[in-house]
Image: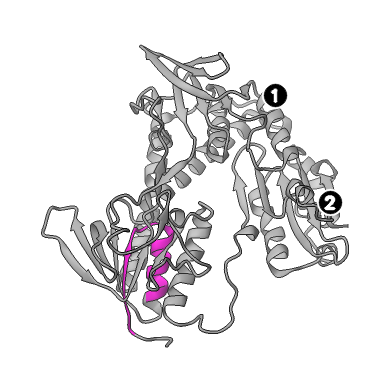
Amino acid sequence: MPGEKKRFVIIGGGPGGTSCATHAARLGADVTLIEKDLIGGAAHLLDCIPSKAMIATGGAMSMMKGAEAMGLAKVDVQLDFDALRDRIVSIEDQLEESVTSLLASQSVRLIEGTGRLTGSHTVVAEPNDGSDPIELEADVIVLSTGSRPRIPDWAPIDGERVLTTRHAYPPPELPEHLVVIGSGVTGVEFVHMFNSFGSEVTLIVSRQQVLPGKDPEVAAALEQSFLDRGVRLFMGARAESIDVEGSQVTVRCDDGRSAVGSHALLAIGSIPNSEALGLDEAGVEHEWGYVKVDHNNLSSQPHIYAAGDLSGKLPLSSVATTQGRKIAQHAMGLHAGPHRHLDYDKAASAIFTDPEIADVGLAEADAFSEGRKIRVTKVPFSVSAKALINNDSRGFVKIVSDPATGVVLGGSIVGRHAAELISVLALAVTAGLTVTDLVESLFVHPALAEVLGEAAE
């Protein structure tokens, strides 16, 4: 029943775990959270937040270098690498302190250490300080241990010349020439980031477009932007070895080509942190290290849940946070009746390149491959007065809708502030709004959002 006192044990203090902890505590649960590294999550605070901080710094540099186009005197701007490092640490510290304070305010018990299932209702915590293990009994167990970068056998990671994402926020030194392996979301953000800092960049693209799985028109816009900025693209090349000789790194590809730089960075996905969780001991079904969950994020055990990257769903902090809230509500009995389940197909996502890229819902290419009838409208930002004022009219808004009902099914945005603008389309997709609803909305003028209404016409 709602409000029933239950003992929650949560292993992993990332966005999913902390969200679940605070919501469960507010609903009257007795909550213990076990985290070995950072409250707030290593993937969040050591990957997501630092990368966006670095991208923001690069964006500020680019804006200042373009001061003449805004009617200002030319500005000579240089990167202060030490100041950038201090800025990142400061942001991380503030966010961790904020989350820790929130947990304390909700009377969540925090154990700094590792957690492991020893049975279907039991967890043992190994404190970081070496003190005796703590045995915990739980009515509800939530697993949210996140993931870590995938490292193939042929990659000699040393944290100096050959890096994973965890070594690069920021790296030990600014690369003279960075070879990025992997053209997914993380890879292209690194390309943009270090190119904006002044590094030469080569991107190894294993397929025939960057951002595999994304709208080809969106991918093409980003590829052109990279080429215009001097980025070298190795299309259709799969890295298979890395050699380090002094200050030179050579990445060899399966098609015979080689990319030579001062540093190499691996961005080819992640693997779940599940091998030491005791999943088998607790009878929790898993596949490839990911916990198999249902629409309530329940595992094969009716009281053990998984959230975040470990659940094998979309690896987004926003998704993990929502999963944590939903888990707390379900475990405390609030979802006994009809309610809205998470629809991962309607999750908005963004890529913080220049220009920014964001999308939500049904993609045009996917609709055609499925044989669905859709209406696609596209308007460039060059028609926007605000884009001209900003001296940046690159990109476009594309809306996918149902031709019979006008319901907005999805959309893509390429351009400045795309990550913010996509929220309007995300709301439309989630709420089942129509293109008419967008057209009749009275947007601010001048504003980039006006293009959303024009694309809906």
| Crowd class of label 1 (few under 14; some 14 to 19; many from 20; radius 10 Å) | few
Of badges 1 and 2, nearer the viewer stands 2
Residue 260 spot, x, y in % from top left: 50, 14
Residue 194 spot, x, y in % from top left: 52, 28
Confirm whether residue 231 shows in the render: no
Which residue is depicted at the point 43% across and 59% down? 15
Confirm whether residue 4 shows in the render: yes
Residues in magenta, as a range: 5-24
Mark 2 is on which residue type?
Val
Which residue is depicted at the point 67% across and 43% down? 214
Q: Secondary structure at mark 2?
A: strand
Q: Name the foreground residue: 174 vs 64.
A: 174
Q: Which residue is mark 1?
A: 228
Please check the rendered image and state whether residue 20 is part of the magenta-colored stretch, yes or no. Answer: yes
Which quadrant would the C terminus be assigned to in this image? bottom right
Q: Earlier in the sequence, mark 1 or mark 2?
A: 1
Residue 167 spot, x, y in % from top left: 38, 34
Q: Which residue is mark 2?
A: 376
Please check the rendered image and state whether residue 409 is part of the magenta-colored stretch, yes or no. Answer: no
> Outermost residue, left direction?
132
Mark 1 is on which residue type?
Asp
Q: Is residue 448 left or right of residue 125?
A: right
Look at the picture and state if 140 lies above or below 439.
below
Which residue is depicted at the point 63% across and 38% down? 212
Q: Name the foreground residue: 314 vs 368.
A: 368
Query: Which label belongs to residue 315?
Result: none
Which residue is depicted at the point 34% across and 56% down? 39
Q: How many marks?
A: 2
Q: Is residue 269 left or right of residue 215?
A: left
Q: How is the image coloured?
A: one colour
Look at the picture and state if 159 lies above or below 384.
above
